[in-house]
Image (cartoon, coloured by chain):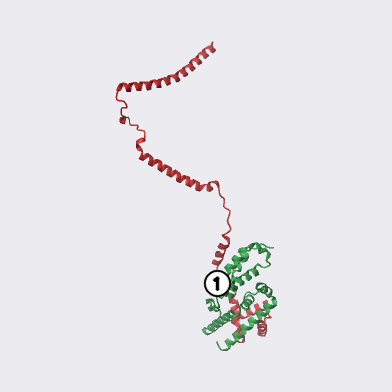
C-alpha cells in the first residue's frame, strides 16, 4: 500500500470537498469551515489511513456529514445567490446575456432547492463526474439507491426548469 | 453534427441512463460550438455543471491548513552544552554586575578605611620621644634578629660547603 501524505493526497481534495460542502450548506464561509474541520478530523486519524481503500471517499463522507450537521444548525435558511453565478460565458448580446445569466441563476436555485440527498447526488455525478459505486460509498447507499435518487433529482430539475421557462422568463 | 444523437442522449440523461462518458459528451456539446435553437434551452444546465467544476478554495487555505496540521510536530533541535547553560550564564552575569556595583558602592561610601600612602598625613603615635625610641628600637631588634637568623643559616651552609670543598680538594 502506498504511503498517503497529507500534503500530496488530502490537501488537493480541498476544492472537491469545498464544492460538496457548499452544495449542502449553501454558504461559502460554512463550507470552508467544513473543509477545514474535515481535514483536521482526517488528520487526527492518520494512523488509520492505510486501512481505508479510498481516502478520497472517506474525506467526502466526513465532509458530507459535517456539512449536514452544520446546515441543520443553520436553520432553514435555504437559498443564497452567490456572486460567481453572475459571470456568463459566451453570449452574443445584452439580451442573451441576461437570459443566460437568469437561466444559470435559475438552475442554481433549482438544484439547491432539492433535498440534500438529491443535491449531493447531482453534485457528485454531474459536477464531480463520479461513478455510481463511488457515490454509493460516499453516501452510504447502494448503487441502486443512488440511481433512483439521481433520476428523481434530474426529473425534478427538468420539470421545474421547463415549467418556469415555459412562462417566458 | 448529428443532433438526433444528442437528443437521444439528452432523453437518456433525464432518465439517468447515461454513462459518465456520455454525460461528458453532452457537456462538451453544450459548452463548445454552436447549439441548435431547439436544444438551446438546455444549454445553461450543462454550462452550469461545467462552471461549478472550477469552484474552489484559494492557496491561502493550504497555508492555513498546513500550519494547523504541521505545528504539533516538534522538530528535534540540537542543544549544545553552551546553549543549554546559557540562562545560567546570564544569571551569573547579572549576579556579577550586582556584586561589582556593591563593591564600588562600598568603596566609595567607606572611603576612610583605605590605606593612606601620603606620609605627610601621618601623625605621631607617642607623646614621649623616649618611649617612641624604645618602641622603634625594639621593633628593629626583632627585625634584625630575624634577618640574622636567616643569615646564620645561609652562612652556616656556605661554611659547610667551603669546608667540604677544601677537604675534597686535599
Q: Against B38, is A37 above or below? A: above
Category of crowding for the residue at label 1, using alpha-carbon neighbours closer than 10 angstroms: few (below 14), some (14–19), many (at least 20)? some
Is residue B161 depicted above or below A152 in this figure? above
Count of numbered circles in the view:
1
Residue B149, image x and y in percent? 44, 19
Q: Secondary structure at mark 1?
A: helix
Q: Quadrant of residue A32?
A: bottom right
Task: Give the image quarter of residue A152.
Answer: bottom right
Q: Write down the chain letter for disc 1.
A: A
Can you give x and y, in whole percent of width and height, for residue B110 in the image? 36, 38
- Res B111 → quadrant: top left
Q: Which chain is red?
A: B
Of residue A135 and residue A162, the one placed in the foreground of this image is: A135
Residue highlighted by disc 1: A30
x, y percentage for residue B96?
45, 43
From the viewer's side, name the closer residue of A56 and A129: A56
Q: List x then y, in percent, for residue B49.
A: 60, 78
Q: Is residue B32 visible?
A: no
The reply, left or right, for residue B101 in relation to residue A27 is left
Q: Which chain is green?
A: A
The C terminus of chain A: image quadrant:
bottom right
Amino acid at each position: 500500500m502506498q504511503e498517503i501524505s497529507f500534503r500530496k493526497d488530502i490537501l488537493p481534495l480541498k476544492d472537491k470537498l469545498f464544492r460538496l460542502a457548499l452544495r449542502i450548506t449553501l454558504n461559502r464561509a460554512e463550507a470552508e469551515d467544513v473543509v477545514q474541520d474535515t481535514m483536521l478530523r482526517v488528520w487526527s486519524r492518520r494512523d488509520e489511513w492505510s486501512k481505508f481503500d479510498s481516502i478520497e471517499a472517506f474525506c467526502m463522507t466526513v465532509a458530507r456529514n459535517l456539512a449536514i450537521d452544520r446546515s441543520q444548525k443553520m436553520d432553514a435558511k435555504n437559498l443564497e445567490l452567490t456572486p460567481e453565478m453572475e459571470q456568463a460565458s459566451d453570449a452574443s448580446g445584452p439580451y442573451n446575456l441576461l437570459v443566460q445569466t437568469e437561466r444559470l441563476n435559475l438552475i442554481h436555485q433549482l438544484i439547491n432547492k432539492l433535498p440534500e440527498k438529491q443535491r449531493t447526488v447531482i453534485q457528485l455525478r454531474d459536477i464531480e463526474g463520479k461513478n455510481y459505486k463511488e457515490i454509493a460509498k460516499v453516501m452510504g447507499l447502494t448503487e441502486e439507491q443512488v440511481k433512483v435518487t439521481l433520476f428523481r433529482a434530474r426529473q425534478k430539475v427538468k420539470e421545474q426548469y421547463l415549467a418556469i421557462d415555459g412562462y417566458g422568463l | 453534427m448529428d443532433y438526433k444523437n444528442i437528443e437521444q442522449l439528452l432523453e437518456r440523461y433525464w432518465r439517468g441512463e447515461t454513462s459518465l462518458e456520455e454525460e461528458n459528451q453532452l457537456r462538451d456539446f453544450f459548452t463548445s460550438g454552436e447549439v441548435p435553437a431547439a436544444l438551446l434551452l438546455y444549454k445553461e444546465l450543462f454550462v452550469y455543471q461545467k462552471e461549478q467544476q472550477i469552484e474552489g478554495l484559494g492557496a491561502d487555505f493550504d497555508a492555513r491548513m498546513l500550519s494547523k496540521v504541521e505545528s504539533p510536530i516538534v522538530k528535534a533541535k540540537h542543544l549544545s552544552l553552551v546553549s543549554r547553560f546559557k540562562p545560567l550564564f546570564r544569571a551569573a552575569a547579572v549576579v556579577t554586575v550586582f556584586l561589582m556595583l556593591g563593591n564600588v558602592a562600598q568603596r566609595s561610601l567607606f572611603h576612610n578605611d583605605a590605606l593612606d600612602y601620603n606620609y605627610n598625613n601621618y601623625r605621631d603615635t607617642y607623646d614621649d620621644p623616649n618611649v617612641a625610641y624604645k618602641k622603634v628600637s625594639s621593633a628593629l631588634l626583632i627585625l634584625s634578629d630575624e634577618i640574622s637568623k636567616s643569615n646564620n643559616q645561609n652562612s652556616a651552609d656556605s661554611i659547610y660547603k667551603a669546608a667540604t670543598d677544601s677537604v675534597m680538594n686535599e
